[in-house]
Image (cartoon, grey):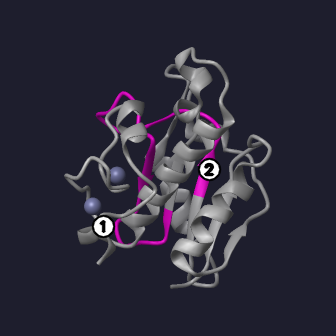
C-alpha cells in the first residue's frame, strides 16, 4: 500500500493530526503524511444548510490525487452533507484515491456535551479508518463493533472500535 495523506481543510484542533498519524501508521504500515493545510473552497459550502457538499469536495480531491499513488483523506473542520442525507460523517471513492471526513459532529461540544479531546480524537480516528476502508474497496459491515459499520448517528460511531472485524480485515 502507498502512503496515506491527511489534508487539513482549515485549522484543526491541536494534536489531532498527530493522533491520526499515530493511529493509522502502525495499522497500515505505510508512511502517513500530513499535507500542508488548505482552506475549504467557498463554492463547496451550502450557505442555507451551513454545511459543505461532500460530493463537491470529493470531486476536487479526485481531480488532483496524490502524485505518489497513495490515498488522501481530507479533514474538514465543519459539517458535511450528501444528496439525500441530512448529514454525513464522510464520503469516499470506493476502491479509489480519496475521501473526506467531517469533524463537526465528532466533537462532543456539537452535541452539547463537555469538551473531551480524547473522545473527539477517537471518533476522528474511527471515521478516518472507516473512509480509508472504503478507498480500499470495503463496503459497510453488519458488525456494530467493526470500524466499517455505518454510522447513522454519533452513538453508532461510539459503539465502533478502531479495528476491522475478521472478515473486513481479510
Ligand atoms: Zn461508510
Ligand atoms: Zn467488518
- Residue 25: image quadrant is bottom right
Marker disc for residue 138: 1
The magenta span reads 74-98
Q: Earlier in the sequence, mark 1 or mark 2?
A: 2
Mark 2 element type = strand
Q: Residue at x 53, y 48 (%)?
A: 101
Q: Residue furthest left?
A: 142
- Report whether residue 64 is seen: no
Magenta stretch contains residue 79: yes
Decide if residue 101 is on the left or right side of residue 86. right
Q: Position of residue 97 (x, y in %)?
A: 48, 71
- Above or below: residue 109 compared with residue 9: above
- Report whether residue 88 is seen: yes
Residue matched to label 2 = 75
Count neighbours of disc 2 (C-alpha within 10 A) and say few if under 14, some if 14 to 19, many if 20 or more.
many
Q: Residue at x 61, y 34 (%)?
A: 78
Q: Residue at x 32, y 50 (%)?
A: 145
Q: Position of residue 9 (x, y in %)?
A: 69, 48
Amino acid at each position: 500500500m502507498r502512503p496515506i495523506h491527511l489534508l487539513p481543510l482549515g485549522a484543526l484542533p491541536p494534536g489531532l493530526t498527530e493522533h491520526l498519524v499515530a493511529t493509522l501508521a502502525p495499522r497500515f504500515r505505510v508512511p502517513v503524511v500530513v499535507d500542508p493545510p488548505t482552506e475549504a473552497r467557498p463554492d463547496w459550502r451550502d450557505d442555507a444548510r451551513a454545511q459543505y457538499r461532500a460530493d463537491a469536495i470529493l470531486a476536487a480531491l479526485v481531480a488532483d490525487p496524490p502524485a505518489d499513488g497513495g490515498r488522501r483523506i481530507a479533514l474538514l473542520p465543519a459539517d458535511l452533507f450528501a444528496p439525500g442525507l441530512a448529514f454525513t460523517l464522510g464520503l469516499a471513492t470506493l476502491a479509489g484515491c480519496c475521501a473526506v471526513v467531517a469533524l463537526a459532529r465528532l466533537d462532543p461540544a456539537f452535541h452539547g456535551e463537555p469538551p473531551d479531546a480524547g473522545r473527539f480524537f477517537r471518533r476522528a480516528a474511527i471515521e478516518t479508518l472507516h473512509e480509508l476502508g472504503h478507498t480500499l474497496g470495503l463496503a459497510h459491515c453488519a458488525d456494530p463493533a467493526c470500524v466499517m459499520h455505518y454510522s447513522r448517528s454519533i452513538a453508532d460511531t461510539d459503539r465502533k472500535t478502531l479495528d476491522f472485524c475478521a472478515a473486513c480485515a481479510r
